[in-house]
Image (cartoon, rainbow, N blue to C red):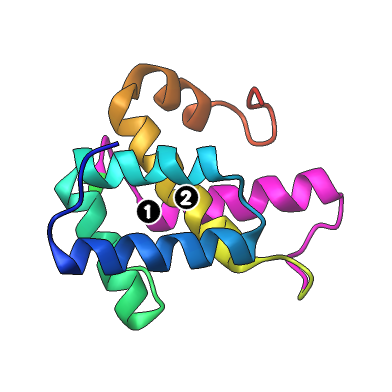
Amino acid sequence: MSIILVNSKLRAYEYLNQLAEYSGWKQDNTDRLWSRFLRYDELYEEFIFYLSHHEIKDDLHFHGYSILDLYVWQMNHYNMIHDIGKNTGNCNKEDLVLRAFLMMGEFMDNPEDFEQKLSGAPHQDRL
């Protein structure tokens, strides 16, 4: 992992770890997400906005998809797995947001695989 020299990045990393712990994430997933934030400035800026406002800014678009699109995809995926048809209060929304950020970072790493996954028939994606 890169050495963090900027105080604001150190604070962002601390907040990420707090959210990840609250969401039940393992450290390796948190580290994977942090590495995407370091690799993609625009993804990091979206995260900083989320930390400050607790909402998705939705400025970053990649191959026609935004963080908000991926959040909705995560929510639908959660509903399908839990076979509930709607998003309940038991759902950890912070986990879904972090998953959407990680998915966007991985999408930016490998657009071909994710475009196929996202453009497939609903609920026919590969896990």
| Direction right: furthest residue | 83
Q: Secondary structure at mark 2?
A: helix
45 versus 111 height, above or below? below
Q: Amino acid at mark 1?
A: Ile
Residue plotted at (77% across, 46% down) = 80
Q: Is residue 20 left or right of residue 4?
A: right
Q: Is residue 88 left or right of residue 62?
A: right
* Closer to us: 121 or 110: 110
Quarter of the picture containing the N terminus is: top left
Q: Which mark is residue 18?
A: none
* Closer to us: 63 or 17: 17
Residue plotted at (61% across, 29% down) = 121
In the image, residue 92 lies at what x, y percent? 67, 66
| Mark 1 → mark 2, Cα distance in angstroms | 6 Å
Residue 59 visible? The answer is no
Residue 115 within the magenta-colored segment of the rendering = no
Residue 75, picture quadrant: bottom right
In the image, residue 30 lies at what x, y percent? 48, 47
Is the C-beta separation of discs 1 and 2 under 8 Å?
Answer: yes
In the image, residue 12 lies at what x, y percent? 30, 65
41 versus 15 height, above or below? above
Q: Which mark is residue 100?
A: 2
Residue named by callout 1: 67
Q: Residues within 10 Å of mark 1 (few under 14, many from 20)?
A: many
Q: How many labels sit on residues?
A: 2
125 versus 96 height, above or below? above
| Magenta region, residue range | 62-88
Residue plotted at (15% across, 49% down) = 41
Q: Secondary structure at mark 1?
A: helix
Q: Amino acid at mark 2?
A: Ala
In the image, residue 127 lies at what x, y percent? 66, 26
